């Protein structure tokens, strides 16, 4: 997802530029991208007034009559800056560890940078540390790795739900036990670490125990 990109050229067809950028970003464009692409401010404002661009966040717009599947997630990333990644419940659903949340649920975003002001529909998490090996991509979107995601949701869901999430992660092979142990070693006192450690080291492991109690819908 090219949050810093945009078309260039002294003479630009505004609609063509907008569509070209939006096509690779799940129907989302930012004002700064359009300006860099040669779309003048009055052309952006005109399309906002006509409803051909929809304001999703400050300086972040949706395009087209149909809302693409991951438009809210992409818009949340734009609203929170270049260093932002999807995390917590949003990341867990993207990895298939927990059911897909309702469409009106906030999008979880994590960054090491401060974000000024609230973002409607976004649940922002600022952290002191997020290493590169804790970031991956899913459906072209930057997202915390399954192991880091399990750690993050460890403080947000109950032990049964966490056990099911870990069971699904192991069954689908999106995470290895060593990856989870590594993230626990890196953040031994982080919120969620104790809950994840208990589930991980339970006698017999989480796989059959969690899935037998209540099968999880694939969403």
Image (cartoon, grey):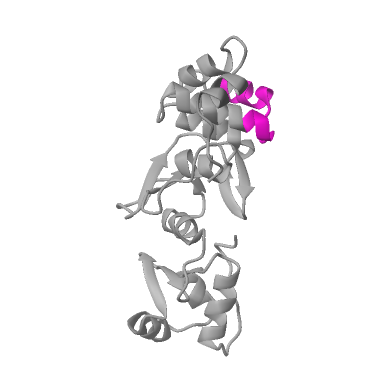
Query: x, y percentage for residue 116?
Result: 33, 52
Residue 53, located in which quarter of the rendered image? bottom left
Q: Residue at x 62, y 48 (%)?
A: 137
Q: Which residues are magenta?
A: 169-184
Which image quadrant: the N terminus? bottom right
Identify whether 57 is placed above or below 166: below
Residue 137 higher or lower than 3, as above or below: above
Q: Residue at x 56, y 87 (%)?
A: 12
Seen from this angle, which residue lies furthest top?
A: 203
Secondary structure mainly formed by the magenta segment: helix
Is 82 on the left or on the right of 177, as rendered? Answer: left
Q: Is residue 6 visible?
A: no
State the residue at coordinates (52%, 82%): 38
Q: Foreground residue, 95 or 210?
A: 210
In the displayed structure, does residue 30 sit left or right of residue 122? right
* Residue 208 sits in quarter: top right
- Residue 60 lies in the magenta stretch: no
Position of 104 relative to 9 (above/below): above
């Amino acid at each position: 997802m090219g949050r810093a990109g945009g078309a260039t050229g002294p003479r630009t067809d505004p609609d063509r530029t907008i569509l070209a950028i939006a096509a690779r970003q799940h129907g989302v464009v930012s004002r700064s991208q359009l300006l860099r692409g040669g779309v003048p401010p009055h052309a952006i404002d005109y399309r906002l007034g006509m409803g051909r661009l929809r304001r999703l966040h400050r300086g972040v717009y949706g395009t087209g009559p149909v809302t693409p599947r991951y438009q809210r997630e992409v818009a949340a990333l734009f609203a929170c800056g270049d260093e932002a990644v999807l995390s917590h419940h949003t990341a867990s659903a993207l990895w298939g560890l927990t059911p897909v949340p309702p469409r009106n649920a906030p999008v979880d975003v994590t960054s090491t940078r401060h974000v000024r002001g609230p973002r409607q529909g976004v649940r922002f998490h600022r952290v002191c540390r997020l290493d590169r090996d804790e970031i991956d991509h899913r459906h072209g979107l930057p997202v915390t790795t399954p192991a880091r995601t399990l750690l993050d949701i460890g403080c947000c869901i109950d032990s049964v739900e966490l056990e099911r999430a870990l069971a699904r992660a192991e069954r689908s092979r999106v995470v290895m036990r060593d990856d989870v142990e590594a993230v626990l070693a890196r953040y031994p006192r982080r919120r969620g670490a104790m809950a994840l450690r208990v589930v991980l080291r339970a006698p017999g492991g989480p796989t059959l125990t969690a899935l037998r109690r209540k099968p999880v819908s694939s969403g």
